[in-house]
Amino acid sequence: MDLSFKTDEGRFNYRVAGLIINDGKILIMKDERSPYYYVPGGRVSLHEKSEDAIHREIKEELSTEISVDRLLWVNENFFEEEVSKEKFHEICFFYLLSLKNNDLLCKGIQFTENENGKVHTYYWKTFDEIQALNLFPLFLKEQIYGLPKQINHLIEIK
C-alpha cells in the first residue's frame, strides 16, 4: 500500500526521488500527461524504508540497479497539481544516486520507458538547461549547483 491518501482537503504523499548525475548532467523525466518535468522516484509503501523505496522505484521505472550515495534533502511541499488541480501535502526524501552499470548511459540523451502501460520519457540535461524547464520541485534548479554534504530540510509552498 502506497503512503498516499486523499482527504476532503487534498492529498498526502510520502515519496522518494533520486538524483542521478553523470558528466555534469542530471536525469529528469516527464510522463505523457504532465506539462512538467521531475526526477525519477515514487511513493513509499507502508512499512518500507525510504532507501528501499528508491531502489525499488528506480528498478521499476528504469530497469537498472543503483547505489545510494546519501540523503540530500527532506522536502515538505505544499502545491496544487497542474493537471488534476488537486491540492497536495507531500513529504519527499531526495537521494543522490550512483549507477551500478552503464545501461542508462547507452540509451542516449533522450529515451522512453514503458512502466506497466505508463510511458515516461527521460532526458539527460545540464544544470543550466534545466533552468528554462518547468521542473518540480522548484528548489532543484537552485540547489543542484551545490549539493549539501549534510541533510537539508526544505519547505516549499506554491
Image (cartoon, grey):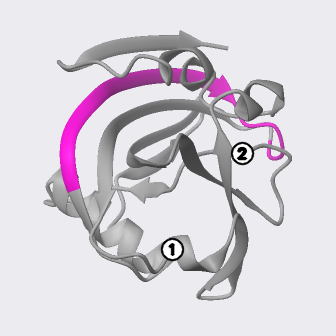
Residue picked out by circle 2: 37
Count the marks: 2
Location of the N terminus (image quadrant): bottom left
Is residue 7 at least partly visible in the picture?
yes
Q: Which residues are magenta?
A: 68-84
Question: For the residue marked with disc 2, what is the amino acid?
Answer: Tyr
Question: For the residue marked with disc 1, what is the amino acid?
Answer: Leu
- Eyeballing the image, is 102 above or below 33? below
Say which element carries label 2.
Answer: loop
Residue sitting at x 17%, y 18%: 150
Q: Position of residue 147 (x, y in %)?
A: 36, 22
Residue picked out by circle 1: 104
123 relative to 66 in the view: left or right: right
Residue sitting at x 82%, y 66%: 32
Q: CA distance from mark 1 to mark 2?
A: 18 Å
Residue at the extreme front of the image, as rendered: 23
